[in-house]
Image (tube, grey):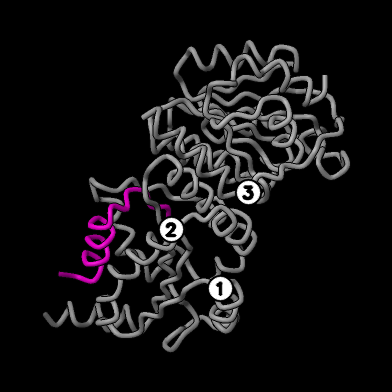
Amino acid sequence: MIRSDILKTLIPVISDKLVVCNIGLPSQELHMLDDQPSNFYMLGTMGLSSSIGLGLALAQKDQVIAIDGDGSVLTNFGTLPTIANNVADNFILLIIDNGSYGSTGDQPTYAGKKTSLAAVAKACGCDNVVECRAEQTADALQAALESHKMTIIVSKCESGNIPVPVITMDPVVIAHRFMNEVKTRN
Amino acid sequence: MSINNRILSDFENNNVEFITTVPCKQLAGVIDVIDNSEKIFHIPSNKEDEGMGLCAGAYMGGKRSAIIMQNTAIGVTINTLATLIQYYHFPLPMLISYRGELGEPVACQVEMAIHTKALLQQMNIPTYHFHHPDDVQEFDAILKHTFMCNKPTAILTDASFWNKANNQEGAA
């Protein structure tokens, strides 16, 4: 399974959840599969999906899922100690780890080589870290939501991309409708 | 009221409830009082662009946020300022220790100091420079301005500002 296959299996689980989605193809795929006002699409700023998601989770009550990639977590490694030390039980970080920088042409990442993001997350102090295979991701995410414990999920999948249109929605519109959606839930 | 408590009360009175910090010697006192505030959630971050992500998320969650950092961080955060904070129109007061100005003992700090205002100007970021202790009187208005216009703003606080403020407090 590649990332877009995983996202397809996640839609029934995440469609009505607050989702912060990573820059590039992940956001474009989610936007194409199931555009919702509860989705915040990152149009730039590689690496900050987990940080935005944590800030959002700490500021309000509803459950938040940040969808991130291995390359993006590698570029913002400082996020994992911050997450570990500021526990928000309404926060789930889902790292789709395809071992490559998918949006830029599938160049390999170190997470696809010797570096284990799950081991790093645990070493940083994250208490609930789950590593799963691609096809187990939806179940792992559902279990994490039901546990109401802050959870880091590392979903190991194959690299590869599908053709998707870019998101043409204005960033201010994305933020505005997302913030309205957050407000209705708090 | 001490300069640190003045800054804290301006944050609190403007309903800033979420502050991330990357430390600086000059800012140690203000970070301390923020950490002790019951009205403000203080979350230290490991790098300033990470901190801006936290602030963006908190703002979308309904909490006014701010970042406290050194001016060296302008070099770290240009992309985040352009593609996240400015692109999505998030307000973000940046209380900045302006290292490398008069009284600076560390030569390397001057290297970013000479670029700081030029970079902020290039980014079209409203910038205020606190040099005398009285300049803090404007802080409340700067916060109101930031949340009125939904832009990042920079408040540069130099060594003269902090030293004179601390000396005044010592004398009093």
Q: Which mark is residue B167?
A: none
Q: Residue at x 23, y 45 (%)?
A: B38
**Observer able to see residue B105:** yes
Hey, what amino acid is under mark 1?
Asn
Q: Please provide percent x and percent y for residue A51.
A: 54, 42
Using residue A49 as the reference point, say whether residue B158 is left or right of it: left
Identity of the residue drawn at 25% across and 76% down: B137
The answer to which of B33 and B15 lies nearer the viewer is B15
Q: Is residue B161 left or right of residue B123?
A: left
In the picture, the disc for residue A170 is 3
Q: Give the crowd class for mark 3: few <14, some 14-19, many >=20 residues within 10 Å.
A: few
Q: Secondary structure at mark 3?
A: loop
State the residue in front, A102 or B171. A102
Q: Residues within 10 Å of mark 1 (few under 14, many from 20)?
A: few
Looking at this view, is A44 or B161 the one in front? A44
Residue A57 part of the magenta-drawn span: no
Q: Residue at x 42, y 52 (%)?
A: B20
Give the foreground label among 1 and 3.
3
Disc 2 marks a residue whose amino acid type is Ile
Question: Percent position (x, y) of residue B144?
Answer: 32, 64
How far apart, in angstroms, are the residues tagged by discs 1 and 2? 18 Å
Label 2 crowding class (10 Å Cα cut-off): few <14, some 14-19, many 20+? many
- Marks 1 and 2 belong to one chain: yes
Q: Which residue is mark 1?
A: B124
Mark 2, residue position: B67
Residue type at mark 3: give it. Answer: Asp
Q: Is residue B23 visible?
A: no
In the picture, measured across the screen, residue A114 lies left or right of residue B56, that is right
